[in-house]
Amino acid sequence: MTLDSLSKYQLPSVTMIECRSAAMPSSPSSEARRRRRAAVFGAAPRPDAGSAERALSGIILDASPHLLVLAADGSEVRLAMSDRTAVWHGGRGGLAALRPGRPVVVRRNASVAERVWVGIGRVSGTILACGRDTVEVDMGPHRGRAHVVIPPHALGPVLVRHPRLEPGYLIDVICVRSPGGPQAVRPGTSQPGYRVDDLAAPEPA
């Protein structure tokens, strides 16, 4: 067999490889993929650089039926109020709950207050001790302890999600601040069915 006869067998395979290589599409660029996604799902909305954050926390300086004035981030913030502004203070509240000096969290739309949470807080951690209507909670090394009061009207809902108000079990409750400390309003998440010290130790590496 001569070299000429060998080339007859080699050339077709080389030609086929070259044809397949030429037919393979190149990997699409990120810009091309973005355009394809936009064509299928629609373009993603672009953030408005001039829009402010919707959530705002601060201390009440003054309040009226039409205006809420807060001290927030070292400045004075004025938010419009309307009859559609919802106020929470351990439940449905009203203008009387917006007292100067109280901490609030506000959900706003531009310069209009849509919803105001007065004195809202959350206590979660390990139960250390329980009284008739109180729970001592260890919230961890960086948050310390909290003495939570559970009023009679909140005890039932709390027990539904936290049936074991006993030392060693976890607790998570939404609270409202008061001069006597946080008062539980309702449960946060459900209580696990085991004690903290019953958790299995990690296996040795």
Image (cartoon, rainbow, N blue to C red):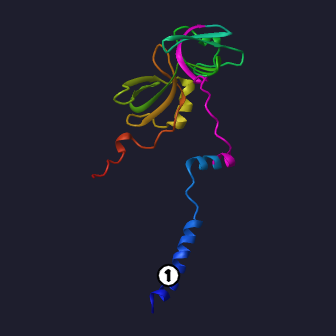
Q: Is residue 103 visible?
A: no
53 drawn magenta:
yes
Three-letter code, disc 1:
Gln
Residue at the extreme left: 204
Q: Residue 75 location, x and y as percent?
A: 51, 11
The reply to whether residue 61 is visible in this rendering is yes
Q: Which residues are magenta?
A: 37-62
Q: Residues within 10 Å of mark 1 (few under 14, many from 20)?
A: few
Residue extending farthest to the right is 83
Viewed as shown, does residue 23 lie left or right of 168? right
Q: Is residue 53 left or right of residue 202?
A: right
Above or below, comparing residue 58 to residue 9 in the picture? above
Quarter of the rendering containing residue 80? top right
* Number of callouts: 1
Name the residue: 64% across, 39% down: 44
Residue 104 position within the rendered picture, expressed as x and y whole percent measured from the top left: 55, 17
Residue shown at the point (39%, 41%) measured from the top left: 195
* Residue nearer the viewer, 146 or 40: 40
Give the quadrant of residue 99: top right
Q: Looking at the picture, tell me which residue is in the foreground, 150 or 11.
A: 11
Q: Residue at x 54, y 67 (%)?
A: 21
Residue 148 within the segment the image draws in magenta: no
Q: Secondary structure at mark 1?
A: helix
- Position of residue 72 measured from the top left corner of the image (x, y, whole percent): 52, 14
Residue under label 1, please give it.
Answer: 10
